[in-house]
Amino acid sequence: MTPGTDVSTSLLLLNEDVLCKILELLLHAGGLNEFSQTSRQVRAACMPVLFRRCFCPVEFRPPGPQMFLPSSAWPHVQYLMVRDDCLDKFNPDSTLCFVLGGPLVDQWLQGMPRLHSVTLYQCGEEPHGLSWRALQSVLSLPVIREFKLDQLHFCPELLPSDELRIEPTGHLTSFEYLLRKRADPYYIESPYTAQPNYNDEMRALSITLAALQETLEILTLATESAPIHLFAQNPWPRLRRLALRGEPSDSLLSSLLSSVSHLLNLQSLVLKFSSTKDIPVRTGIIWRGAHTDPFPCPVLEELVVTYPDSADPLFDHLPPTLRTLSLCCWRHLYHEYLSPYRQWDPSDAPRPLLLLSSAEMHEVLRRSRTTMLRHLTLEYRANDGDDEFLQYIAQNYPLLTRLKLIRYRPAGVDDVPIERIARLLRPLAQLSELKIHLDHPEMPLPGLALMLGAGGFYSKSSMDEFRLVVDEMADVFARELSSSVNILSIFTPTAPRRSNWARFRVVHGRALQEEE
């Protein structure tokens, strides 16, 4: 390097691939923004990496494009995430958002030639959503491949001027519509709050999905407005993953499997059905066909069923192609242990009554005959059949590489046989990752929060004591499990609140905790 040459500028002389790798390393290390300010040439080289992913909170309709995102960044944006912080959500007369609309979606997004993915979301749970015109504009963008609407309703209200048609772009491969209802018992919805019109949502979704069905590979829908009839009316030649989330109606359950029987390329079916809020009950029997009928999706590799019913004939018909199976609650019951608003001991709450026992889960697995599984997730309450159940898993799923067990103690039992559980799972010779919750009686619970939205409070001494318990549990599993295991995760409030899982690397039979 000649004397006086600027080091940062000289980096621009590197091979383009090498330069890109260096910029990516700086991005993940947190120093790319500072590096980009060393010169104009360096700034220009960093722009595609700096602005590849952009996050924009929106509180009001921006008066101009520069107030949304500098136009100099537009050519580089590939992944755009917009958070709706507007006050329209508190309007008692309408559920429509009038901020995410107008030139923002009609013009400005059109000026992002590399835009690959658009995510629109809100943090709250107010009934609030996008107008048909706004959705029409976003979904008609010729460049996007992925669209995600999270906690915002899909056209919760049709206006008289709305024309229900959409031009398919021929490129959209992923469409995700996610809704979560409040599960907290303390929450009472105001009778004056405007409610979404699910019939309007279903009409808008029907038109949209019919136009997109030829290219979609991933589809997630809310049960309240899912146009289930569309699956039988269209070929969906590329659909590989279908997820349905929410409280299912009996009509949806009764037609579900017959509708998806047309999806011959479906590899993943995720049924995250919630139990009713007021009186917790299982979501219902899924298999409504004859006992001799084959499973409708011949190449299915992943199946997720929440609140499974041991009497469901579904488990007698699972295909041999299955590689991933999840039978659990939604949300997992352990989240209730961390709720600062609970007015009961989580072990005695109504929803745990929906758990299958060890013996019932054992019978479900025995009937399913899915011995080629690689990944297995189970949530259950232990009973006298616990040892036989764990032995069955260890002996009949030799190819398992990932296992997640969410085990709750029997009522009135304060002992957790950690070492015995670990030894029963030892025969899993290909297991590389174990994720486990054992409902340890010493796990601290949060104190009552005094204000809505607070996270509750823990005793420091109880947290310090339980951190030692978690470390001891990790050491037992690291010592007793097969040498193939290299990752171990234990559910605990002592872990970072973002995940609530303490993660350990297993090295030569020792558990070494990873820091986030």
Image (cartoon, rainbow, N blue to C red):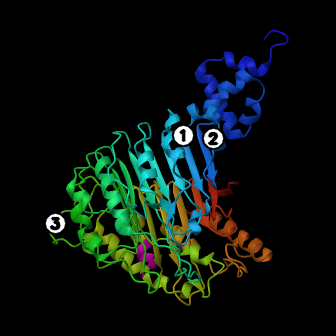
Where is residue 273 shown, x and y percent of the image?
40, 71
Q: Quadrant of the N terminus?
A: top right
Residue at figure coordinates x 72%, y 69% from the top left:
467
Q: Mark 2 and mark 1: span between their CA atoms?
A: 9 Å
Outermost residue, bottom side: 412
Residue type highlighted by circle 1: Trp
Corner quadrant of residue 388: bottom left
User: Which label lies toward us, 3 or 2?
Assistant: 2
Where is residue 36 shown, x and y percent of the image?
73, 30
Q: Is residue 318 left or right of residue 351?
A: left
Corner quadrant of residue 307: bottom left
Where is residue 120 shown, x and y percent of the image?
52, 53
Q: Are marks 2 and 1 in contact (CB under 8 Å)?
A: yes
Residue at figure coordinates x 26%, y 58% from the top left:
230
Residue with the mark numbered 2: 69
Whichever of callouts 3 and 1 sits on the residue coming sooner in the sequence is 1
Q: Quadrant of the C terminus?
A: bottom right
Residue type highlighted by circle 3: Asp
Residue with the mark numbered 3: 293
Q: Is residue 172 above or below residue 318?
A: above
User: Which label lies toward us, 3 or 1?
Assistant: 1
Residue with the mark numbered 1: 108
The magenta segment: 384-390
Residue at figure coordinates x 62%, y 23% from the top left:
18
| SS for callout 3 | loop
Q: How many marks?
A: 3
Outermost residue, top side: 2
